[in-house]
Image (tube, helix red, strand yellow):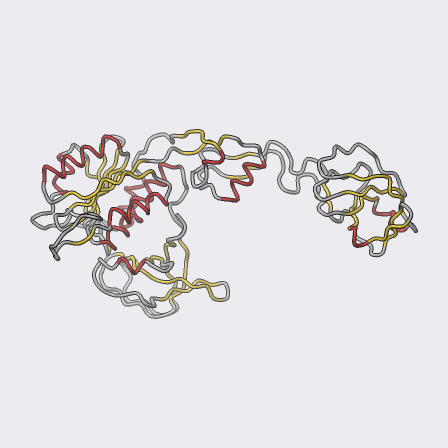
Amino acid sequence: MNLLSYETSSNMLDLLNTGVLRSENVPLSASLGRVLAEDIIAQYNDPQFPTASMDGYAIISSDQDLECIRIVGSNPAGNDEQRVISSGECIKTFTGSMMPQGSNTLIQIENVSVENGTIIINKRVGKGASVRQIGEGYKAQDVLIKKGTKIGFAQIGVLAGLNCVMVKVAVRPRVGVIATGSEILDLGVPSDNPAQIRSSNNYTLAALFEQAGAEVLQLGVVGDDKASITQAFINALESADILVSTGGVSVGDYDFVKDIVPRLGAEIVFKGVAIKPGRHILVASQGNKFIFSLPGFAYSSTVTAILYTLPLIAKMLGKEKPYKTIEAKLAENFEKRSNMSEFTACNVVVEDGEYFVNFDNKKVGSSAILTNLLDGSALMISGEEDRDLEQGTFVNVILLDSF
C-alpha cells in the first residue's frame, strides 16, 4: 500500500473547494461560540469625548498652583455637561462622566480637602490625570474583531458596546457521525457478550466537532453489514455537509467502508497516509459534501479527526486555523516508534516563559488509549525524517484546548 506523506495529504485537504462562506444573522445573546462572518469595524471613537476615569474634580491643571479652587457644580455620570470651566473653577465629576469643557485634568477626591465651597489641593497630579482621552479604547474605522474569530465573552462585551443587536456569523457545517462495527455497542444497550465494547468514538468525535463550531448529527452505531452501512451513509449525506465514520477502513474481511464509499459515487481524495496513528484514513468528496472514514481505535479516530476533519470545519467557518500550534522543547528523550509522521500525546508546561514537553503518565501501547488525551494533553509532532529525539530538541505541538 503506497502511503502519502502527511504534508502531501494536508496540502490536498487545503485544496478542497468548500464553496462560498455561508452566513446568517443571529441575536447577540445567541452568538456565543459562533464564528464571525465579517470584520467588526468601529463606527466612532471610544470614548467620543474626554471622560473621567475616577471620581474627583475636573480642573485646569495649572490651577493646582492656586490656594484654592471654587466648586461651581456637580457632574454625575450620564449628564450632558455643557458648562465651560474658567481658571479658578472646578466641577465635581464622577467616573464615566463627560469632562466639562475647559478642563484638562481630574484630581481625585482623596487628593483634596473641601472647605467653604472650594477645594484645597493636598496632593498634585499630572496634567491629563484620570482622563480617558478621545479614542483611547479605539478609533473610528479600527477593525476591532476580525472575520473568522470565535465569539467569546470579550467579543460579546465589545459587540454590546457597539450596539450590535444582531451579529453576522458563519453557518455551522453539519457533521454526521457514524460508528461502524458489529463489536460496537451503543450506550444503554444491554448485552451479555463480553467481546462487545461500548461505543465511544461517535460521542468523542461529536463533542470534538461541536467544540470546533459544527452542528453535529449523532447517527449512532451500524454493524458490519454492507447494505446497512451503505444506507446509513446515503441517509447521512442527505442532511450532512460532512460525514465522519469510524471503523471499516483497514484491510480486514469485515472492513467494508473503504469499498462502500466509492460505490456511493464519491471521489476518493486520498486513502492511506504515512501517519501514526491512523494510516488507513480515507477522505472523499461527493459534490460539495465530504466523507472522512477514520480508523476504529479511539485514539486513532480522535487524532485523525483533529488532523483532517477540524481543518475542513475551520475552512467552512472562515477560520484561519483549526487549532493553535506552538514550538516547545523536549524535557526528556523521545523514542520514535516508526518511520512515519507521529502524533504523540504529551504534556506541555511553561517554565520561565518557555514551553516544555514531557510524557509523564502517558502510556505507550496501541492506538486505543484515549485516556492519554486527558488532563490538558497536547499532540507532539515528529516527522517522517525524524528519528529518536534528544532532550532539548525543539518540536511542534498541537494544543488541544484551542478549538
Along the horizontal axis of the image, is 184 left or right of 81? left
Query: Residue 311: image x %, image y %?
Result: 33, 43
Residue 266 placement: quadrant: top left
Q: Which residue is at 56% across, 39% downward?
A: 158
Q: Which residue is at 63% across, 37% downward?
A: 139
Q: Residue furthest left?
A: 253
Residue nearest the viewer, comparing 240 with 397: 240
Say if 137 sits above or below 121 in the image. Answer: above
Q: Which residue is at 22% across, 52% downward?
A: 278
Query: Residue 356: image x %, image y %?
Result: 41, 64
Residue nearest the viewer, comparing 170 with 156: 156
How many circles with numbers are drawn on the protein?
0
Along the horizontal axis of the image, is 250 left or right of 125? left
Along the horizontal axis of the image, is 255 left or right of 242? left
Along the horizontal axis of the image, is 61 left or right of 51? right
Query: Residue 347: image x %, image y %?
Result: 37, 63
Query: Residue 306: image x %, image y %?
Result: 31, 49
